[in-house]
Amino acid sequence: MGKLQMTPDLLRSLLQGTAEAVIAQAEHLTALDQAIGDGDHGINMKRGLQNVLADLDNITAKPPAEALKAVGMTMVMKVGGASGPLYGTLAMTLGKEWPTDDELDSSKLGQILAVSIEALKKRGKADLGAKTMLDVLAPVQQALEANKSIAEISVIAQQAAEATIPMKATRGRASFLGDRSIGHMDPGAYSSALIIQTICQLLEEKS
Ligand SMILES: [Mg+2]
């Protein structure tokens, strides 16, 4: 991935595009969560992101770093379950670590995501291989560090979500199922991959 200047307009289109893509898949997220969780992932993500969309003018009037923190706060305050605090932590940490000149490249974005992954591990008391969103975010972070192309990153995110299917959950509600969690994609891994793939697609359309 090459250099990228994050403008308020670009951030707005990325936020709107990813929120709409996730909301459009809410039923699928629910179905995935019904298989190994409590079935609330779709409705939770939809509620949080509808609040983000409703407040998009205010959010994107702020500089990108502050806008990301505001998205994170919205997710934490409006969403129950695990997904609000986790996606909220992700967005807030991205905002905290954001470069002051809003200039990103693969290695800078990799650094920011690395710090965010550490914050998520703490928040969720989870590590890699526990069948969570971390199993998508970590390979994407490595791909950024390795300066992979946007197209490659998109494929890596999708493959990483698929790779959670044979995993046994050891964190979250799915872990109560033990071996019966094997054979299902993790809903958080799916929503993370969907967000990353949507961002990749929007960035490619704009380049
Ligand atoms: Mg759930």
Image: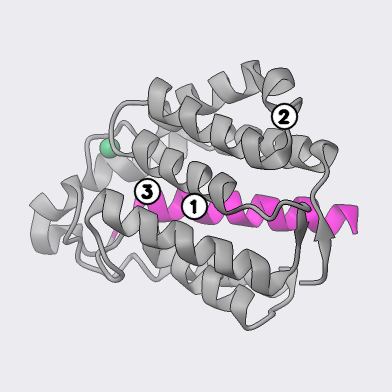
Instruction: Please identify the quarter of the rendering in which residue 164 is found.
Output: bottom left
Point out the frontmost of discs 1 and 2: 2
- In the image: residue 144, left or right of residue 176: right
Q: Which mark is residue 62?
A: 2
Instruction: Please identify the quarter of the rendering in which residue 34 is found.
Output: top left
Label 3 SS: helix
Tell which circle, 2 or 3, labels the residue nearer the N-terminal end.
2
- In the image: residue 11, left or right of residue 81: right
> Considering depth in this image, is 78 or 36 the residue closer to the camera?
78
Label 1 SS: helix
Q: Which mark is residue 187?
A: 3
Cβ of mark 3 under 8 A from ligand 1: yes
Regarding residue 161, the answer to whether it shows in the image is: no
Residues in magenta, as a range: 184-207
Residue type at numbered disc 2: Lys
- In the image: residue 110, left or right of residue 121: right
Write the residue at 9% across / 50% down.
176
Are the residues tagged 1 and 2 within 8 Å (C-beta)? no
Residue type at numbered disc 3: Pro
Tell which circle, 1 or 2, labels the residue nearer the N-terminal end.
2
